[in-house]
Image: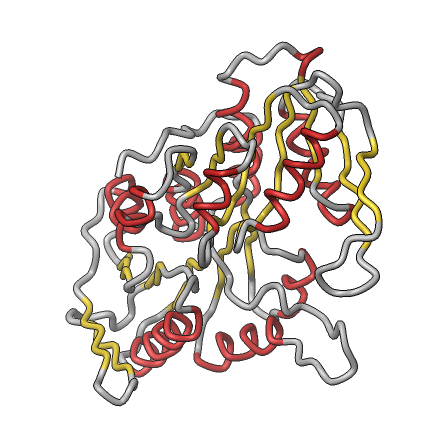
Amino acid sequence: MVKETVLFALTSSTDLAAKIAKNLGLTLGRIKVDHFADGEIMVTPQETVRGRSVFIIQSTCPPVTEHLMEVLVCIDALKRASAAEINVIMPYYGYARQDRKADAHQPITAKLVANLLQVAGAHRVVTVDLHAAQIQGYFDIPIDDLTAVPILGRYMLDKNIPCEELVVVSPDHGGVVRARRLATIMKNAPIAIIDKRRPRPNEVEAQNVIGDVQGKICVIVDDICDTAGSLCAAAKILKDHGARDIYVGITHGVFSRDALEKIEASPIKEVVISDTIPLDVEQRKRTTKVTCLTMADVLSETIDAIQNHTSVSRVYDRYNEHELSSGQDDA
């Protein structure tokens, strides 16, 4: 790693950033983030960035808008301090679920966020498992969208579940590509799809499972768990169709409201997440079923490739071949 690189951690991703910095042999840059009484935010780098390549590490997880504003203000501060290149490492991209107009008068806020990052002065963005792949097309600057699926898959493989007993489950039709990717990693396991039709909000007309789960060990895979309502409903449907055990692999554990309590009361045996969103001490006390894996290794490799102008695709390839560590988060 060249000496001109500076890593800054904002308030949502300090633990992940510390692991990345350690992997790269760097010390996190000193930065001051002030939140004033009226809600305004000021971000002030505490060291010189002139002519240097800077990486901001921040997930825009709840409180989403507050964390997004920290990133935008930080980018502006770095630009005005003459940073040569500003790279935003945003493992969780807030507002990604507002990626299209589902109703005539709705905004496309995922595109607005992309515009804001670019206008503020970002030169590159790195994300993990965007909710919709087309969000990459909202940017006119380079964007790398990594995935946690290989890390989740490797963890599940280590459980040594017999292939004939395993089924990878997509919780809806939109997640089939992700489920197929995990199934390929897990020795080409078969997949199943949960078919839910909603004639009106909060009403389910029909519930069915496409595929055989009778007596099987099911692994549900998804990108986001927010309130856990859909996830726990999916687990119940699988149980009703004869599933033996249910595991879950999730990239972004948002866990809003009573999500963890719902998971604890559900038939789910274990939920495996990544640390794109930190699982705080209070949340850890509320659950016995959540295991957190770190994305620090692949993010470190990606930052190193960007900074040294080598192929990020090679990081993808190594990652998919399970050569990178997928160690359990020991935070």
Side of 46 where 42 appears, left or right: right
Of residue 282 and residue 328, the one placed in the foreground of this image is: 282
Which one is nearer the viewer's eye here, 70 or 238?
238
Task: Kindly identify the residue that appears in the image at 28 percent across and 43 percent down.
Answer: 19
Q: Is residue 83 above or below residue 57?
A: below
Quick check: 210 left or right of 60?
right
Residue 17 vertical position relative to residue 182 in the rendered view, above or below? below
Report the label total. 0
Q: Residue at x 41, y 41 (%)?
A: 295
Residue drawn at the location 78% of the way across and 53% of the way down = 204
Q: Is residue 91 visible?
A: no
- Asked whether 125 or 163 is in front, the reply is 163
Residue at image coords 50%, 82%: 119
Position in image of residue 191 (x %, y %): 75, 29
Q: How far across and down, in percent of the image, does residue 235 sit?
A: 63, 36
Residue 251, compared with residue 14, is above or below; it is: above
Instruction: Tell me where residue 40 appears, x and y as whole percent.
Output: 29, 86
Task: Tell me, yes or no, if residue 86 can be seen here.
Answer: yes
Judged left or right of residue 37, residue 91 is right
User: In the rendering, at what x and y percent does residue 322 appear?
Assistant: 51, 26
* Quarter residue 82 falls in: bottom left
Considering the image in quadrants, where does the C terminus appear?
A: top left
Seen from this angle, which residue lies furthest bottom? 38
Rendered image coloring scheme? secondary structure
